[in-house]
Image (cartoon, rainbow, N blue to C red):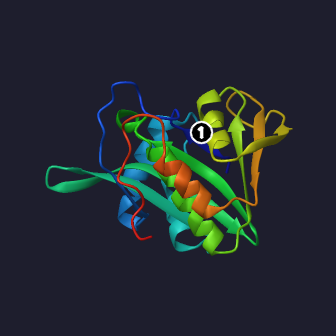
Amino acid sequence: MTSRTLEPPGPASGAESIDFTIRPMRLEDVPRVHAIDTLSFRLPWPERSYHFELVENPTSELWVAEVQQAERFEVVGMIVLWVIVDEAHIGSLAVHPDYRRQGIAQALLVRSLQAAAWRGATQATLEVRRSNLAAQALYRRFGFEVVGIRPRYYRDNQEDALLMTAVNYDPAALQQLLEQPPGPGRGPGIPGQ
């Protein structure tokens, strides 16, 4: 599976602030997560892949962002991250188109990297499309740097992927970055800390 990210960094100008929470993904979230994936990427993961990650892959960290809609909560973003020895690898990160530019991707990224650090990760890697400048800006904000290129990595158009890595990241410093985003549109932070 390839790494994917879709949410421009930072809030839109004049965007209303929304409240959201970050929590571990559950099996009942899979259909909504798959729907967000399908809306966000040209090559969405099959629904069964999310089921596998939740039930069978002990290296997985899966998180969702949710907002309250009337009397129910709705999943609006997700991240999949694998922790292998001391490295976290971001597999996928997406936010529903109606909820982008609200800081949700940032909060998902920080929460998953914090969880990875608690499991022993000291560095993180990902692949991102060369053309996805918004995602690259998000990752740079959190200490990721381009360390290589994977030529023709994406099957749909043979686009290169940039390999980005953050070495010796500090979970507390990530949290501070999250708490100081530019402008309005932040969620209430990350619960459970």
Residue count near mark 1 (Cα–Cα under 10 Å), binned few <14, some 14–19, many ≥20: many
Above or below residue 13? Residue 30 is: below
- Residue at 40%, 34% (x, y): give it: 97
Above or below residue 131? Residue 92 is: below
Residue 183: where, in percent of width, then height?
Answer: 42, 34
Where residue 131 sits, quadrant-wise, is top right
> Is residue 59 at least partly visible in the picture?
no
Residue 153: where, in percent of width, then height?
Answer: 77, 38
Left or right, 56 with respect to 150, comes to left
- Residue at 65%, 63% (x, y): give it: 82
- Front residue (pair 96, 33): 96
- Front residue (pair 163, 11): 11
- Front residue (pair 122, 67): 122
Q: How many marks?
A: 1
Question: Could you tell me which quadrant the C terminus lies in?
Answer: bottom left
Left or right, 10 with respect to 129, comes to left
Residue 109: where, in percent of width, then height?
Answer: 55, 52
Where residue 112 sits, quadrant-wise, is bottom right
- Residue at 35%, 63% (x, y): give it: 28
Q: Secondary structure at mark 1?
A: helix
The amino acid beneath tag 1 is Leu
Residue 6: where, in percent of width, then height?
Answer: 54, 37
Residue at label 1?
138
Left or right, 16 with respect to 4, comes to left
- Residue at 55%, 47% (x, y): give it: 93
> Is residue 121 at least partly visible in the picture?
yes
